Amino acid sequence: MKLTKIKQIQVKDADTEFTVVQRKRRRSQLQTTFGTAVSEEVKGITRYAHLHVFGFEPNTTEANITRYLSKKGINKIKIEQLKSRRPEEYASYKISVPLEMLEEAQKPSLWPTGVKMNRFLERIWLKSQQKT
């Protein structure tokens, strides 16, 4: 079920006030097409999905995580340490994995006990950085 946005207009009449409800016009979205051909001459970029992975021991390094994921078969990652709320208790990272490896990277069996993971929300993170 898809909900549409509704625009309300206040119309004043001499005797009564009432609200006319009108549907908001939909904007047409352009359909994006992704290429599938393989070429040695011309290549496309690798698309990445970003994960927020946290709950590591504070002394865990980017190199430790890169080696760990490489052993598990997840390569070509980008990793960035984030400022944790309590850095003396745990470490947080933004880990970018190729889109085709996202499902594998989200499996709970991949991560050590105590480590938590969810999708990285860039806008929320940027807002929190502006506050500090």
Image (tube, helix red, strand yellow):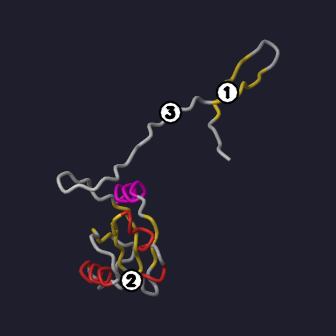
| Percent x, y of residue 23 | 65, 30
Predominant secondary structure in magenta? Answer: helix
Residue stretch rendered in magenta on the structure: 122-132
Distance from disc 2 to disc 1, alpha carbons, whole Å, reads 53 Å
Q: Earlier in the sequence, mark 2 or mark 1?
A: 1
Q: Is residue 101 magenta?
A: no
* Residue 35 against residue 65 in the figure, above or below: above
C-beta proximity under 8 Å, tags 3 and 1: no
* Residue 11 against residue 125 in the figure, above or below: above
Distance from disc 3 to disc 1, alpha carbons, whole Å, reads 18 Å
Decide if residue 7 is on the left or right side of residue 87. right
* Residue 62 against residue 13 in the figure, above or below: below
Q: Earlier in the sequence, mark 3 or mark 2?
A: 3
| Frontmost residue, 132 versus 42 | 42
Give the residue type that dot 1 points to: Gln
Q: Which residue does the numbered mark 2 point to in the structure image?
A: 89
Secondary structure of the residue carrying numbered label 1: strand
Residue lying furthest left: 41
| Frontmost residue, 125 versus 2 | 2
C-beta proximity under 8 Å, tags 3 and 2: no
**Residue 80 visible at all:** no
* Residue 80 against residue 16 in the figure, above or below: below
The crowd level at tag 1 (other Cα within 10 Å; few <14, some 14-19, many 20+) is few
Q: Which residue does the numbered mark 3 point to in the structure image?
A: 28
Disc number for residue 22: 1
Give the residue type that dot 3 points to: Ser
The structure residue drawn at horizontal position 65% and vertical position 42%, both measured from the top left corner, is 3
